[in-house]
Image: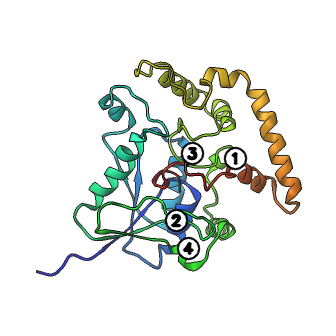
Amino acid sequence: MSEKPVRHILGLSGGKDSTALAILLHKEIPEMEYFFCDTHKELSETYQYLQRIKARLGIKIQHLNAERGFDHWLDIYGGFLPSPKMRWCTKKLKIEPLEKFVGDDEAISYIGIRADENRDGYISTKPKIKPVYPFKERGLVKTDIIRLLEESGIGLPDYYRWRSRSGCFFCFFQRKYEWVMLAQEHPDLFAEAVKYEQEHSDGRRYTWTEGENLLELIARKDEIIAEHDKAVAKEKKVASNTSLAEALGSVLDEDDDDDDLPCLACQL
């Protein structure tokens, strides 16, 4: 009986880096398996972007968690919402579905961490899943990723106008400005996030963002927007050749190396 071939897998999050990696590798590795861990709580722009990727590259993207999304696991956890110190969402909606997807097979997992980033991302505890970092191996940095996206015709996802990373619309790693913009871009989703916050069943005051609940945050939205605009203008002034979009990205990504950033299974 012949040995089963090693699988090649690439997780797409709906973010720029994993998309650029798919662009880089889809012709080099035609047997690549692409997957998306679907929380059922993604922005509509994320699903639209995934459709654009499929159409441009001519690839299939398997959606994991087809039956069990965030609300299922929230119920299992007794209404206890995830937080930076209790990231059950990453475990149940990203890591475990990936490991189930691979099973006992040997697999090479291609991860879109750039050469200008000092981190490794999620490394499976399963010894048969080997992580590789093509951007690091080839010395590709953020400007190269933007070039790949532009030259492919895929471009950036629309939510990058106001948000720095992919993931659930209520991700607790969002900055306060991003919450304000969620309320502006998707008032229905903001209202849903408020409802989750208010109905948290732990018996303590829970807030998605540190120090204030979402209704308190949105009450001072003008102040938050003004602070953000000031930071963008400062960034633009420091780097005079920087476009407004790049300045916005720099402000939103200014702590990309923070240890408290979301698991890279969510955001790449």
Query: Given the image, on which type of amino acid does mark 3 rest?
Result: Glu
> Which label sits in the foreground, 4 or 1?
4
> Which label sits in the foreground, 3 or 4?
4
Can you identify the residue that label 1 sits on? Answer: 161
> Which label sits in the foreground, 1 or 3?
1
Say what secondary structure mark 1 lies in. Answer: helix
- Mark closer to the chain start, 1 or 3: 3
Can you identify the residue that label 4 sits on? Answer: 136
For this view, does 134 lie left or right of residue 123?
Answer: right
Residue 227 figure quarter: top right
Q: Crowding at label 1, few (<14), some or many (≥20) Cα neighbours within 10 Å?
A: few
Say what secondary structure mark 2 lies in. Answer: loop
Circle number at residue 184: none
Task: Name the residue: 50% across, 19% down.
Answer: 198
> Up-down: is 232 above or below 227?
below
Q: Crowding at label 4, few (<14), some or many (≥20) Cα neighbours within 10 Å?
A: some
Query: Given the image, on which type of amino acid does mark 1 rest?
Result: Arg
Task: Name the residue: 24% across, 68% down.
Answer: 105
Can you identify the residue that label 3 sits on? Answer: 45
Query: Given the image, on which type of amino acid does mark 4 rest?
Result: Lys
Query: Given the image, on which type of amino acid does mark 2 rest?
Result: Gly
Residue 102 figure quarter: bottom left
Q: Position of residue 150 (x, y in %)?
A: 67, 66
